[in-house]
Image (tube, rainbow, N blue to C red):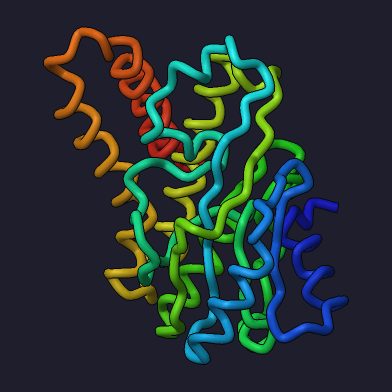
Amino acid sequence: NDKGLAHGRNIGLLLSKADVVAYLDDDAIPSRNWLNRLRLLFERDKELTGVFGNVQPWFMDKSCICNKMPTEIYWIFSCTPSYMPNKPETFYRGFGTNMAFRREVLYKLGGFKIGLGVGSSKKGWIGGEETELALRLCNKKYKVIYDPNLIVYHVILPSRCTLKYILGRAYHVGRTNRILMHRYSKYTRKECKSQITLGFLKSIAKITLRNTLNIKNAEKLLFLIVASISFFLGMLNRR
């Protein structure tokens, strides 16, 4: 019924009874100390509203082309790119594969926005239900952090390690970012909106400067250029 993944996340919110609601994807494996780390973070800081954690890819096919990708564009697989903070800090960006929020605040904000996420449309779904929520949290000045020590492993099947999937995913992420930027341009604080695309642009600059003069990384540089083109083509899509 085109309600999207956001609808499923809201069902979990409604059925939950704990003070903190944590989310994983069905193809994600939490590290051994994941729950203990979450509990520690929220118990230590009563002002903390939400946490995004570190998502590391687990490629099922060790010989696939995905192993040649630069870590800066791991966002294609909803995994943490290497330009993310290397210590816990306030940061309003992450992945639904590894996140947690105080239930009371999610209720107050109306939960995740229906119509976003996988399954939101048969013709071309719009992702970013977690990004949209993070924008609202940022705009209301709730405290959200990214913690690199809160780790889950995202299983990447061989079927996703194809050039067609990678380019399609990059295009889709670009399109989703443009739609979210357009929807929130009028009433979202500047520092909140900048986190949608700023990280991606930083990754381009970082890896380009690092690899341009290094012939050994030519394959990774090519990956970045092609994925970047696909991303920006998606941003130009006005539908």
Point out residue 215 in the picture as x, y percentages from the top left corner. Answer: 20, 8
Judging depth in this view, the residue of 36 and 195 nearest the camera is 36
The residue lying at 43 percent from left, 22 percent from top is: 69
The residue lying at 20 percent from left, 21 percent from top is: 211
Looking at the picture, does residue 125 appear above or below residue 194? Answer: above
Exactly how many numbered labels are in the figure?
A: 0
Point out residue 18 in the picture as x, y percentages from the top left corner. Answer: 78, 83
The residue lying at 48 percent from left, 52 percent from top is: 179
Point out residue 120 in the picture as x, y percentages from the top left corner. Answer: 73, 50
Please state if 83 lies on the left or on the right of 106 as rendered: left
The residue lying at 50 percent from left, 40 percent from top is: 173
Please state if 91 lies on the left or on the right of 110 as rendered: left
Please state if 186 lies on the left or on the right of 125 as rendered: left
**Image quarter of residue 27:** top right
Looking at the picture, does residue 111 appear above or below residue 163? Answer: below
Judging depth in this view, the residue of 96 and 89 nearest the camera is 89
Judging depth in this view, the residue of 162 and 174 nearest the camera is 162
Point out residue 35 in the picture as x, y percentages from the top left corner. Answer: 68, 66
